[in-house]
């Protein structure tokens, strides 16, 4: 039986297309210092550091954690570097959580970042390789056919993606850390934006951001002490009630790339651990990795929030808006901030902030159970957690 | 808690590829599949029996973003598996798997890693991209030159001599004669080696590791599962890792504080006086790519003269990046399976000049 583990601190940077005011070290410290302050801790209180990011080509630094060790207070401590494609921010948090759940450490700092302005992410993802299918100019080219397959399969009307694009950007206006603050965002703006990879328009795709996210994870005695400490923010710990990862191969004959089995298996595992049988009723809000607008209805189905073929109906009815039946991506989501390596941890961190009542203007009042979700690769790597305000 | 009082986990099987200069057109799958298949077969398992899989590699060697994604095809991840990846040597993938096994809900884990350095026009120059990107990497100091600075620091401190370094190389090559996977082997005396010219003073060619392509895999199992899978499990009695600061100018390069701390965490020195040397270690496999690093590590680990160090030939005989650390754990475990060792130490390193170090202590029943 795993030990209890809770998030006791969350921090993130201001996300922007180009954070040329900070180095990579400055970027990760900005997030980490905020997480430590939220937890009422100092660098010396941390037992180990777990850091994640997407491909090193994005900054042109090979294994940058080596250089970042002093900036993250890791000198003399254990430090682990995780990389699991786009899901990395989520899986990094899970690797850190396992250090606590496995009884190895009491307080772990986990950080994820990307400084994408140091390179061109689209082409860093598209280097041609022998005997490998080309990524066709970045992730959008890869995912557009999956979206078209979903639209046909679910018989979804073509404006659903644009609804998601508007909703998430409206949420981002409430989030001071978000990269995109598109005042007055509306359907016409999205519809008139250029078509990049049919059916994905410019405003239906995620931005390329510089940013970082950090969390402090703690065992039960520490979490209880932090919650009652004057030094900390005094917010409720966000307790982990379920945590799961799944992977499957990129492609093989018969693989369902629209609704991958790894997604279904991962969410079934995390719901089983948390005792959730009816997610739309039992989960108060969800922060889910939606890098292209249409992935909201796709994941609504895959994650069991709707029946197959009906996810788009929740979106169309406004159920996923703030104040709706099941708010999704309260922070503005990946569509509003996308430092790739950190994007998964931002989802996990937003779930924790909602439990802790720390989400400010995009807080869903009374959140007691939240889902954090990340995926990556060719919709093949998944990591998820369920947090509650009660100790398991 | 250190790794000493944890749930019992053992190394129950290990496979490595032949370590060679060029794997030619072998891709990630072709590098990984043979060792994963062999490690699973030795344990009598298939991927469906495995509770958690973790791999280690780095994109920069092959020049492929997400090179670990392709490697996953070697595992047969269907139905989907619980899986993770570290951008580190496979020894840290093993550490992550060991941590995962501590949660208590699964009994087995598969660890694999691969490194194909041959596509790089200059591996030593490529490795300069591991350095601080603002103040060091722009100078392109190559990995051999940086190691030479470290070697010089130890010589100046009187920690060892160039003859000591040559003796390490001569012994490595002789030991590697018995290692069918080794890349550099031979019977040559330290005197002969010392007569060679410098490559980057004070390093001669024999002080440096070969450039190697290769792969390795390990199966871990807990408690009774381990006893079922193998006659003599190599129980992990302690495992820990630490990192030193990055800036070379801020470090005493002749010492390895992170190795000392990791060894203490892994229980190498016993619970007795801090001055105790390594306790009853029979065999130590040290991941020391350069001769002088083996001497620095021996000192940090306080290994006595009775300890057999690197019977495989070590990283001087074959140094597949992201692999050579896990190979040390596998080679040390092998000595326990065979009965040659009761208590073995394995060490892995990462980063310039031994910046990050992992120590794993294993014992027979």
Image: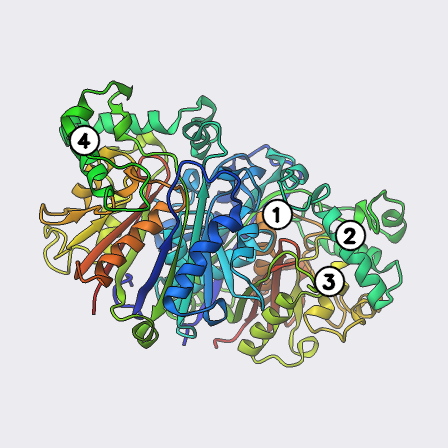
- In the rendering, at what x and y percent does residue B295 appear? 19, 37
Left or right, residue B143 beside residue A375: left
Mark 3 belongs to chain: A
Left or right, residue B283 beside residue A125: left
In whole angstroms, how far apart are the C-alphas of marks 3 and 4? 61 Å
Q: Residues within 10 Å of mark 3 (few under 14, many from 20)?
A: many
Q: Residue at x 18, y 52 (%)?
A: B283
- Tell me the residue that label 3 is attached to: A258
Instruction: Kindly state the secondary structure of the residue where label 3 is placed.
Output: loop
Quadrant of residue A129 within the rendered picture? top right
Of the image marks 1 and 2, the number of the one nearer the N terminus: 2
Instruction: Kindly state the secondary structure of the residue where label 2 is placed.
Output: helix
Q: Residues within 10 Å of mark 2 (few under 14, many from 20)?
A: some
Between marks 1 and 2 in the image, the one whose residue lies nearer the viewer: 2
If the image is split into quadrants, where does the N terminus of chain B sit?
bottom left
Is circle 3 on the same chain as circle 4?
Answer: no
Q: Which mark is residue A340?
A: 1
Is circle 3 on the same chain as circle 1?
Answer: yes
Q: Residue at x 86, y 52 (%)?
A: A186
Instruction: Kindly state the secondary structure of the residue where label 4 is placed.
Output: loop
Q: Which mark is residue A144?
A: 2
Q: Nearer the viewer, residue B89 or A357?
A: B89
Between marks 3 and 4 in the image, the one whose residue lies nearer the viewer: 4
């Amino acid at each position: 039986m795993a030990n209890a583990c809770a998030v006791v601190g969350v921090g993130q940077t201001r996300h922007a297309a180009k954070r040329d005011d900070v180095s990579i070290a400055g970027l990760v410290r900005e997030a980490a210092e905020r997480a430590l302050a939220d937890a009422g801790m100092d660098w010396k209180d941390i037992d180990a550091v777990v850091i994640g990011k997407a491909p090193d080509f994005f900054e042109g630094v090979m294994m940058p954690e080596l250089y970042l060790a002093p900036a993250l207070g890791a000198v003399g401590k254990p430090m682990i570097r995780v990389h699991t494609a786009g899901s990395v921010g989520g899986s990094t948090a899970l690797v850190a959580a396992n250090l606590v759940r496995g009884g190895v450490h009491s307080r772990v700092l986990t950080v994820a970042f990307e400084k994408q302005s140091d390179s061109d992410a689209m082409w860093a993802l598209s280097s041609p390789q022998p005997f490998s299918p080309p990524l066709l100019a970045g992730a959008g080219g890869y995912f557009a056919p999956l979206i078209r397959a979903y639209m046909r399969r679910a018989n979804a009307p073509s404006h659903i993606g644009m609804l998601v694009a508007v909703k998430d950007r409206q949420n981002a206006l409430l989030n001071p850390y978000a990269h995109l603050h598109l005042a007055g965002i509306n359907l016409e703006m999205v519809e008139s934006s250029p078509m990049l990879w049919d059916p994905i328009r410019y405003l239906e795709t995620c931005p390329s951001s510089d940013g970082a996210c950090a969390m402090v994870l703690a065992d039960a005695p520490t979490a209880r002490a932090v919650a009652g400490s004057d030094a900390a923010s005094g917010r409720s710990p966000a307790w982990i009630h379920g945590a799961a990862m799944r992977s499957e191969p990129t492609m093989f004959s018969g693989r369902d790339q629209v609704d991958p089995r790894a997604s279904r298996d991962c969410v079934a595992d995390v719901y089983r651990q948390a005792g959730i049988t009816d997610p739309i009723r039992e989960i108060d809000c969800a922060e889910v990795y939606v890098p292209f607008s249409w992935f909201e209805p796709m994941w609504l189905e895959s994650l069991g929030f709707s029946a197959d073929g009906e996810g788009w109906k929740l979106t169309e009815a406004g159920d996923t808006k703030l104040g709706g039946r099941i708010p999704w991506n309260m922070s503005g989501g990946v569509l509003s901030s996308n430092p790739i390596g950190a994007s998964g941890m931002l989802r996990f961190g937003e779930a924790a902030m909602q439990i802790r009542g720390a989400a400010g203007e995009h807080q869903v009042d009374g959140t007691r159970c939240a889902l954090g979700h990340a995926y990556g690769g060719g919709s093949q790597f998944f990591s998820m957690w369920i947090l509650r305000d009660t100790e398991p | 808690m250190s790794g000493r009082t944890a749930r019992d986990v053992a190394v129950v099987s290990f496979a490595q590829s032949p370590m060679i200069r060029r794997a030619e057109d072998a891709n990630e799958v072709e590098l990984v599949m043979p060792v994963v298949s062999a490690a699973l077969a030795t344990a009598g398992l298939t991927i469906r029996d495995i509770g958690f899989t973790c791999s280690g590699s780095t994109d920069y060697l092959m020049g492929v973003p997400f090179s670990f994604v392709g490697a996953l095809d070697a595992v047969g991840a269907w139905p989907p598996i619980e899986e993770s990846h570290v951008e580190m040597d496979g020894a840290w993938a093993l550490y992550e798997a060991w941590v995962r096994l501590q949660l208590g809900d699964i009994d087995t884990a598969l660890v694999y890693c691969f490194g194909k350095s041959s596509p790089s026009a200059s591996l030593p120059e490529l490795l300069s991209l591991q350095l601080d990107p603002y103040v060091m990497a722009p100078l392109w100091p190559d990995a051999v030159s940086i190691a030479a600075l470290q070697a010089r620091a130890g010589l100046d401190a009187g920690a060892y001599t160039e003859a000591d370094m040559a003796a390490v190389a001569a012994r490595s090559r002789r030991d590697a004669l018995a290692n069918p996977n080794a890349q550099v082997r031979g019977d040559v005396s330290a005197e002969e080696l010392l007569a060679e010219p410098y490559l980057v003073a004070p390093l001669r060619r024999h002080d440096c590791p070969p450039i190697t392509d290769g792969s390795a895999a390990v199966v871990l199992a807990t408690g009774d599962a381990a006893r079922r899978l193998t006659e003599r499990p190599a129980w992990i009695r302690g495992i820990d890792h630490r990192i030193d600061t990055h800036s070379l100018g801020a470090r005493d390069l002749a010492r390895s504080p992170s190795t000392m701390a990791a060894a203490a965490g892994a229980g190498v020195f016993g619970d007795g006086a801090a001055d105790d040397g390594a306790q009853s270690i029979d065999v130590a496999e040290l991941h020391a790519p350069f001769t002088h690093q083996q001497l620095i590590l021996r000192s940090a680990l306080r290994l006595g003269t009775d300890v057999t160090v690197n019977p495989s030939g070590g990283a001087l005989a074959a140094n597949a990046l992201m692999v050579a650390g896990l190979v040390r754990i596998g080679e040390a475990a092998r000595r326990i399976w065979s009965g040659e060792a009761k208590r073995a130490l394995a060490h892995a390193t990462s980063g310039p000049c031994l910046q990050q170090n992992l120590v794993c202590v294993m014992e027979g029943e």
